[in-house]
Image (tube, rainbow, N blue to C red):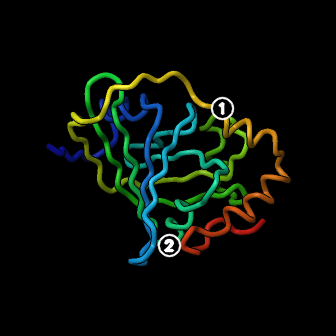
Amino acid sequence: MVKLHERIDGRLREFIEAQHVFFVATAPLAADGHVNVSPKGLDGTFVVLDEQTVAYLDLTGSGAETIAHLRDNGRITLMFCAFEGPPNIVRLHGSGRHVGLEDPEFASYRGLFADQPGTRGVVVVDVQRLSDSCGYAVPLMSHEGDRDLLTRWAGNRGEEALTAYRATKNATSIDGLPALDPS
């Protein structure tokens, strides 16, 4: 049974902040566009800003679907699942935006996150619907630790190479929507 909540506080906040992985879902407005679901993790890359707002550090990756979809329509859902302990699923439905490195607003968020090589911005989500449900079918799994492959990859590139990578690999979505502006 789904239960709706007014704000991120108490038990829900503790649950969200304790999860090692969450999933981000976005989609373009176009009926023939691709829906995207991305797993996110790494300790220190997600924060609850207040009772209606969350943010996560956006790291350079193979694509930029989330950024493109947020530019297109702003719709976003974050899902947190209990893989350890009592079953639970929490969904944050809302409106999101990408705050890039070059945006003056980025500086106000930077200190909230662990320093990660390859950072390309922050995704800020204004939560409009907050729910949790049973999670009875979510498997039990143990967290062994964060993978360091993405951060090692980014750290070995250097900022100039990462800028070039983002200009070629993160400029548009798989549907051709604009994502990151060329730097």
> Which residue in the structure is indicated by mark 1?
148
Position of residue 85 relative to residue 172, above or below, is: above
* Mark 1: amino acid: Asp
Residue lying farthest to the left in this orientation: 1
* Mark 2: amino acid: Asp
Left or right: residue 61 versus residue 125 is: right
In this view, the mark in front (2 or 1): 1
Question: Which label was assigned to residue 2?
Answer: none
- Say whether disc 2 or disc 1 marks the residue closer to the N-terminus: 2
Position of residue 12 relative to residue 55, above or below, is: above
Q: Residue at x 63, y 69 (%)?
A: 172
Q: Nearer the viewer, residue 72 or 101?
A: 72
Q: Residue at x 75, y 64 (%)?
A: 167
> Which residue in the structure is indicated by mark 2?
72
**Image spot of residue 58 (x, y percent):** 60, 49
Q: Quadrant of residue 83?
A: top left
Q: Residue at x 46, y 59 (%)?
A: 36
Instruction: Give the distance between the C-alpha atoms of the residues marked 2 and 1, in whole angstroms.
Output: 31 Å
Q: Could you say whether the residue bearing mark 1 is in a helix, strand or loop?
A: loop
Q: Nearer the viewer, residue 178 or 32?
A: 32
**Image spot of residue 12 (x, y percent):** 31, 35
Position of residue 95 relative to residue 1, above or below, is: below
Q: Are marks 2 and 1 in contact (CB under 8 Å)?
A: no
**Image spot of residue 153 (x, y percent):** 74, 41
Q: Residue at x 76, y 58 (%)?
A: 165
Quarter of the image with the N terminus in it: top left
